[in-house]
Amino acid sequence: MASRADNVASNFNLGNFAQATELRQRIWFTLGALIVFRFLSFVPLPGVNPAALQNLADLARGGVLDLFNTFSGGSLERMSLIALGVMPYITASIVVQMASALHPTLAALKKEGATGRQKLNQYTRYGTVFLCAIQGYFLALGLETLAGAQGIQAVVEPGYMFRIGAVISLVGGTMFLLWLGEQITSRGIGNGVSLIIMAGIVAQFPTFATNMFEGARTGSISSGIVIFFIAMVVGLILLISFVERAQRRLRVEYPKRATQRGMVQADNQYLPLKLNTAGVIPPIFASSLLLLPLTISNLGSSSLDTDSTFGTAIVTLNQYLQPGEPIYLTLYAIGIIFFCFFYTAVVFNPEETADNLKKNGGFIPGIRPGKRTADYLEYVLTRITVVGAIYLTFVCVLPEYVIRQTGVPLFLGGTSLLIVVNVTVDTITQIQSHLFAHQYDNLIKKAKLKGRKR
């Protein structure tokens, strides 16, 4: 006999949106907040000439600033109020998360529940403000220096007043985005910060699609390359959707408990271990480290003496570290694999998990509680991390290789695809949860009405 949950799932359809008033309000609120985010990306910093920024953006093309520009939806290229986006918050949260796993005091805060998490969130915000101030100051200083060296007057009145105003504006823009993301999380649908990053990435799709199809029409891009790009993106999306939901489920049993009414049957549960525990952190870290020397050399190319030994070494290093080059792809793959194992070891502690299972009376069948369970969890986690690292390396390296071979810039790299697919799947899952909850509420109301009639 089908359960009530099965009946609800079989009756699931999009027509339920018409009755789910709260869900519709949440979706409209989310769309409105994302529109506000897109409007802000076109508001320039005070004292900046937007017409001269395009030439400056071309100098940093291909570097780490290009990666941040993708995540901010082009805000960095336009030097808007939200040019830094939410990347300082992401960096601060990663640092705090790693510190909470390594530092005893922060680790104790993490175990205190809601109060400890609130304190860690406060530290994350302090770190975000600090990173925004540092990055904003050097961004304003670099904008002045680069503009003067290239003969491009991007800053109307250079000086300390411009730098102070730029830092205040950039810090305020990033903190406003965090507040907007919190409002989306609490009053909208999905994770607010993740949706803001995804909106910035997807916003560049129309420009890329228009340029690619226009190139196919004029003959500068062959039709076969266009078809291959579409097939590759669709294939990667299907692969990411499948692997990101893949889990290694370990069976956990709990012994029978005696109560006043008699013996209670033993409980069986599963401990899910994600195939890709590290998420999108490894490719972000690996690409940032590799693109950092290229960014510094591009911004300092005007003052670089190419005839000197140091200048020649920098030019040679940049040639080998260009995205798509064999050495770059090799180092990129090694960095992804390294950060996969490193970050997985930070976010998942087998000993802590084994102790929690032992305290609650749970055990894995065939494995003794305590040290043996921790060793078994570490063994299983290492095996699935190998598969996850190979998957991440393939998804992130393949677009870089294709871009290098074809010469056509792909707006969605491996990291961007991972973010877009993960956020989309998570948002759809939350929408389905709201619809299921609405259907259960209707079933309960009908059951109460029938009970009153009786």
Image (cartoon, helix red, strand yellow):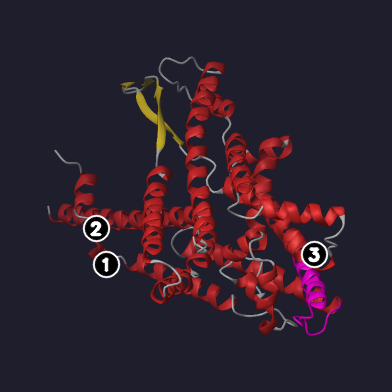
Q: Is residue 325 left or right of residue 362?
A: right
Disc number at residue 124?
none
Which amino acid type is marked by label 1?
Answer: Gln
**Residue occupying the point 81% across, 69% down:** 302
Query: What amino acid type is highlighted by mark number 2?
Result: Asn
Q: Are marks 2 and 1 in contact (CB under 8 Å)?
A: yes
Using the image as rendered, state which of residue 278 and residue 293 is in the foreground.
Answer: 293
Identify the residue position indicated by label 3 in the image. 300
**Label pair 1/3, CB-CB below 8 angstroms:** no
Badge 2 is on which residue?
A: 442
Q: Nearer the viewer, mark 3 or mark 2?
A: 3
Q: Which quadrant would the N terminus be assigned to in this image?
A: top left
Residue 91, image x and y in percent?
A: 66, 53
Q: Which residue is disc 1 drawn over?
A: 19
Q: Secondary structure at mark 3?
A: loop
Q: Position of residue 245 (x, y in %)?
A: 40, 43
* Labels 3 and 2: the sequence-earlier one: 3
Residue 109, can we see it? no
Query: What secondary structure prevails in the magenta region?
Result: helix
Distance between the Cα atoms at labels 3 and 2? Answer: 64 Å
The residue segment tinted magenta is 136-159
Q: Regarding mark 1 in the picture, which secondary structure is present there?
A: loop
Mark 1 vs 3, N-terminal side? 1
- Residue count near mark 1 (Cα–Cα under 10 Å), binned few <14, some 14–19, many ≥20: few
Q: Amino acid at mark 3?
A: Gly
Residue 198 placed where, x, y %? 50, 62
Which residue lies at the image location 76% right of the left edge and 65% below the top edge?
Answer: 299
- Residue 64: quadrant of the picture: bottom right
From the image, state whether disc 2 or disc 1 is nearer to you: 1
